[in-house]
């Protein structure tokens, strides 16, 4: 699908991979709505000229309101990119022998259920749009992680949430194909973003040495370039694309 003139709705679009994608899609001529938690980064997205929508992806009513605002101010989105997410780490049993089911639930609610909720709401609006070239109505791009398949110790919640995102890709593409809506997932490897910056510096330095080539962390612009390509290439559908410089994570 050509990007110019279409509306893009990007969750987690105030930071990192989503922020770069918002900039790339806007540069390609999309009208961009950014949904994120309220805060200075969302204000920066507003200052950059995007429609800034403050909402938590776990809040169904707030999501519905944000999507309605996007539709009324920019139009129904033909491009949806789900980048809102949290990286959590917790062992099943911590050193004190305690368990933390609340943290698992929160991770799945944000990363997996949040992505599904945004996709569902967007599809309701997209389905009413006229098809454009090749009978296409829109594209949903979700973000998993290589942790969906190579989860490390302490990543049960994160890996399960991202495996869920990857798992819904094919059935969603199969269901939405009759509407001319594609569903694709990107599974990034190790990228230099504020999420990564949240890790201790020695961990970041070690992670940067892991990819065989290029021997560095990925750049948000590299994710955004693939996101743009996914929108433009109609044959990409129902699949999860690793973007990782051939890195495979060790158990810990
Ligand atoms: N950076 C990496 O190495 C990497 C690797 C694999 C996957 N990912 C995934 O890519 C996506 C983007 O990550 P990033 O590295 O750009 O991180 P980031 O922290 O820079 O951006 C994530 C954004 O999501 C927003 N967000 C978090 N919880 C939210 C909620 N409940 N409701 C609405 N917005 C919420 C944050 O405010 C933030 O702006 C995430 O899903 C992450 O899991 C990142």
Image: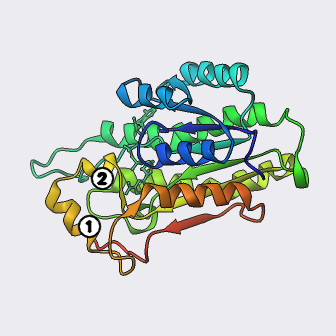
Q: Give the SS element for disc 2.
A: helix
Residue 176 percent across, percent down from the top left: 79, 48
Q: Give the SS element for disc 1.
A: helix
Answer with the quarter of the image where residue 37 lies: top left
Q: Is residue 219 above or below residue 44?
A: below
Left or right side of 142 for 71: right
Q: Nearer the viewer, residue 201 or 23?
A: 23
Residue at figure coordinates x 55%, y 41% from the top left: 115
Residue at figure coordinates x 61%, y 35% from the top left: 118
Q: Is residue 123 above or below residue 230?
A: above
Q: Are marks 1 and 2 in contact (CB under 8 Å)?
A: yes
Left or right side of 94 for 121: right
Residue 122 can be seen, yes or no: yes
* Disc 1 to disc 2, C-alpha distance: 10 Å
Residue carrying label 1: 207
Residue 5 percent across, percent down from the top left: 76, 39
Total of numbered circles in the picture? 2
Residue carrying label 2: 196
Residue 57 can be seen, yes or no: no
Q: Quadrant of the C terminus?
A: bottom left
Left or right side of 59 for 65: right
Q: Is residue 106 above or below residue 175?
A: above
Residue at disc 2, CB closer than 8 Å to ligand 1: yes
Residue 224 percent across, percent down from the top left: 54, 54
Neighbor class of circle 2 (other Cα within 10 Å; few <14, some 14-19, many 20+) is some
Q: Tell me the quadrant of ligand 1.
A: top left
């Amino acid at each position: 699908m050509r990007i110019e003139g279409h509306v893009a709705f990007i969750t987690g679009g105030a930071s990192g991979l989503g922020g770069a994608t918002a900039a790339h899609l806007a540069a390609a001529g999309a009208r961009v709505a950014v949904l994120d938690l309220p805060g200075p980064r969302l204000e920066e997205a507003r200052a950059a000229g995007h429609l800034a929508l403050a909402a938590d992806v776990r809040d169904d009513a707030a999501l519905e309101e944000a999507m309605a605002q996007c539709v009324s101010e920019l139009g129904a989105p033909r491009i949806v990119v789900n980048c809102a997410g949290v990286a959590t780490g917790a062992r099943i049993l911590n050193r004190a022998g305690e368990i933390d089911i609340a943290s698992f639930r929160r991770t799945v609610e944000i990363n997996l259920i949040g992505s599904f909720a945004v996709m569902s709401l967007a599809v309701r609006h997209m389905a009413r749009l006229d098809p454009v070239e090749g009978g296409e109505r829109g594209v949903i791009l979700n973000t998993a992680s290589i942790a969906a398949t190579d989860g490390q110790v302490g990543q049960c919640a994160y890996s399960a949430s991202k495996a869920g995102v990857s798992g819904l890709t094919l059935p969603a593409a199969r269901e939405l194909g009759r509407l001319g809506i594609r569903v694709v997932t990107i599974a990034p490897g190790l990228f230099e973003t504020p999420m990564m910056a949240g890790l201790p510096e020695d961990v970041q330095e070690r992670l940067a040495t892991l990819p065989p080539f290029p021997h560095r962390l990925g750049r948000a612009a590299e994710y955004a370039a693939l996101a743009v390509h996914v929108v433009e290439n109609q044959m990409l559908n129902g699949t999860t694309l690793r973007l990782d410089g051939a890195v495979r994570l060790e158990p810990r």
